[in-house]
Image (cartoon, grey):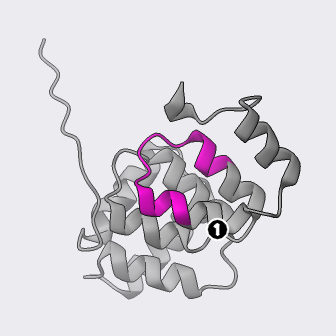
């Protein structure tokens, strides 16, 4: 038996309907799936970029969902999608943990995430600079 794995890269122009199928595979919470399906039913031809814009404006949806998406779909998101989701991150500790744990951040992602925690987490920053904690991509 031959198994073929097709790797999808999600861009801002990807049909949002294609993304919803992946949410189920990645074990998204019911709330995220319900929000996505309701949103898609009201906006049939929407792109991922348009859905993210609506998500960013939705005061009910927390940054935790952005962090989950960035982490769960880490290698499947193109840089533009990742940057939009990073924009939702407000918590310095969430930003610090994404900075530490993601492998595929580019230099601009690094700068954006660092700007969200630099000077606000002195112990964590000191431990990172001293090597007590490390970035996953540096190990």
Query: Is residue 60 left or right of 70 when viewed as pictured?
Result: right
Look at the image and tell me in which quarter the N terminus lies.
Answer: top left
**What residue is pinned by disc 1?**
115
Look at the image and tell me in which quarter the C terminus lies.
Answer: top right
**Relative to 83, residue 53 above or below:** below
Q: Position of residue 29 (x, y in %)?
A: 61, 54
Q: Position of residue 110 (x, y in %)?
A: 52, 57
* Dot 1 crowding, Cα within 10 Å, few <14, some 14–19, many 20+: some
Query: Is residue 95 left or right of 80 when viewed as pictured?
Result: right
Asked if the magenta segment contains residue 108, the reply would be yes
Query: Is residue 84 left or right of 3 when viewed as pictured?
Result: right
Q: Secondary structure at mark 1?
A: helix
The stretch in magenta equals 97-111
Q: Position of residue 130 (x, y in %)?
A: 75, 33
Q: Residue at x 49, y 85 (%)?
A: 54
**Relative to 132, residue 7 above or below:** below
Q: Residue at x 49, y 34 (%)?
A: 137
Q: Nearer the viewer, residue 24 or 117?
A: 117
Q: Residue furthest left?
A: 2
Asked if the magenta segment contains residue 109, the reply would be yes
Q: Position of residue 49 (x, y in %)?
A: 35, 77
């Amino acid at each position: 038996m031959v198994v073929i794995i097709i790797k999808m890269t999600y861009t801002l122009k990807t049909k949002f309907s294609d993304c919803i199928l992946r949410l189920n595979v990645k074990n998204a919470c019911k709330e995220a799936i319900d929000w996505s399906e309701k949103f898609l039913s009201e906006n049939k031809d929407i792109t991922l970029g348009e859905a993210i814009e609506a998500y960013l404006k939705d005061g009910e949806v927390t940054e935790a969902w952005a962090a989950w998406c960035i982490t769960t779909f880490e290698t499947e998101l193109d840089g533009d999608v990742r940057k939009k989701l990073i924009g939702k991150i407000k918590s310095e500790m969430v930003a610090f943990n994404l900075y530490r744990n993601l492998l595929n951040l580019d230099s601009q992602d690094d700068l954006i995430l660092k700007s969200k925690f630099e000077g606000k987490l002195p112990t964590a920053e000191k431990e990172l600079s001293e090597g007590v904690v490390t970035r996953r991509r540096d190990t």
